[in-house]
Image (tube, grey):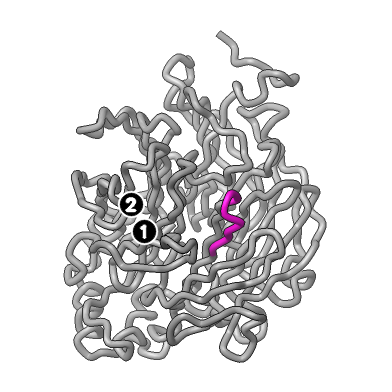
Amino acid sequence: MHTYQNQKRLMRKLTHACVYTIVAMGVASVGVKMVQADETCLSPYIPKITGQEDFVYIWTLGSEGLGDEQDKMVTVDVNPKSPKYGKVVNTLSVGGRNEAHHSGFTDDRKFLWAGGLDTNKLFIFDVHTDPAKPKLVKTISDFAAKSGGVVGPHTTYALPGRMMITGLSNNKDHGGRTGVVEYTNDGDYVATHWTPTDSQLDGAVKTGKFADGYGYDLRALPRKNLMLTSSFTGWSNYMMDFGKMLQDPEAMKRFGNTVVEWDLHTKQPKKVFDVPGAPLEIRCAWKAEHDYCFTTTALTSKIWLIYADKSGAWQAKEVADIGDPSKIPLPVDISIQSDDNMLWVNTFMDGKTRAFDISDPFKPKQVFEQKIGAQVNMVSSSWDGKRLYYTSSLLANWDKKGDDNEQFFKAYSWDGKQLKENFAIDFTKEKLGRAHQMVLNAYSIYQNGNTPEPKK
């Protein structure tokens, strides 16, 4: 049975050899990690499901030799009162393998945008006419051309009447230099906002050593006119075989080390923070009195806090470790609960989910951990915090091999102390592919419209 022991040893060897860029910055504890969607991570402009969700949409990578081998949107019934509870009720293939990754609703929650990191296509699904059966209504194939060279559409994030799409790369050198691309809800290109670099700061102020221009996630705090973006790596890395990348010292230098503060209304960059080690997912607090967001760093296994100080200025501070960085846990997706008291963090390498008490955001404390599978990536939390959903795939070329390449969707209930598995779907056995990112939906969101109610 193939495991990642060889990769782990290699990662430690590379760490000791100090080939990572971050070592040059004086950071001693180094690993290689990646992060990545849930009801509590949605844009604050989107209506929330505060009761029981009916469906989870899983944006799934096509896998060679499985089923039709195409990327697809998979719909799972997750309402315990439904006769189809725990079952796949619909699949919709989009053609080819595009490196399906993230998806996000428009501000009216009627449409779901999903991106492909390799082909740069954006797929727009109607999810309100019949939530049980999403319908593909538009495919955007000229994202790179319209944006002026941004590739790797990652986060699809709703603002009023707009969709903001972060890029991971560019079509000139396939490196990490990229930007944020703005569209209308109808799918019309509006503008490209390039991430600041040393040579093109666009009015932003560097707070440390870096202004690398890399991109990854995007989140907003409208009450503070704040937009934040994080950073990862370019096409040449994320489409490379994981083991091969680990053996390439130059590739291991090509990771971002910044979080950028933007003016939400004007889309102008204001500050570039040094957050060394590829800060990935950003999750912001929900309560009006909580002016902070969290991110985790891929190369150092740290939790970082982006917060407003007493003068109202935004700052970045490292506040906690995730597991034991020397054991290469590989942190992936994070999820903040709606009461702002807990942060869930998945670690891909050991297949665990961890819960951190963040009631004091400056001092997160791990209070729970549980193994979910041989590998685990995404975690999605219901608004009430009682249900958690997990999926397995990271990237097609980064997933584990052999028997460790478990591909699943799993549903759990959480009572505040224990996770209880309610059901699981084996995506390999069902010939669906690699289960990646999730969003939730419910009939109740559209109860004033003409949406059909579920049959009793």
User: Are dots 1 and 2 in contact, CB under 8 Å?
Assistant: yes
Which disc, if any, is residue 376? 2
Name the residue: 70% across, 21% down.
Answer: 451
The disc labelled 2 sits on which kind of residue? Val
Q: Tell me if 447 is positioned left or right of 247 in this view.
A: right
The disc labelled 1 sits on which kind of residue? Val
Q: Which residues are magenta?
A: 222-228
**In the orientation shown, which residue stands out farthest toward the front?**
311
Measured from the top left, where is residue 255 in percent x and y? Answer: 44, 79
Q: Is residue 434 visible?
A: no
Q: Quadrant of the N terminus?
A: bottom left
Q: Is residue 286 visible?
A: yes
Q: Tell me if 306 is positioned left or right of 206 in this view.
A: left
Which disc, if any, is residue 332? 1
Q: Quadrant of the C terminus?
A: top right
Disc 1 packing (10 Å; few <14; some 14–19; many ≥20): many
Determine whether the residue tagged by mark 1 lies in a helix, strand or loop: strand
Residue 192 versus residue 103 in the image, above or below? below
Name the residue: 58% across, 60% down.
Answer: 227
Let me know if residue 50 is in the magenta part.
no
Q: Quadrant of residue 26?
A: bottom left
Residue 83 versus residue 200 in the image, above or below? above
Measured from the top left, where is residue 376 in percent x and y? Answer: 33, 52
Q: Quadrant of residue 196?
A: bottom right
Measured from the top left, where is residue 13 in percent x and y? Answer: 20, 84
Q: Name the mark nearer the viewer: 1 or 2.
A: 1
Q: Quadrant of residue 16?
A: bottom left
Real-space Cα distance between discs 1 and 2? 8 Å
Residue 259 versus residue 352 in the image, above or below? below
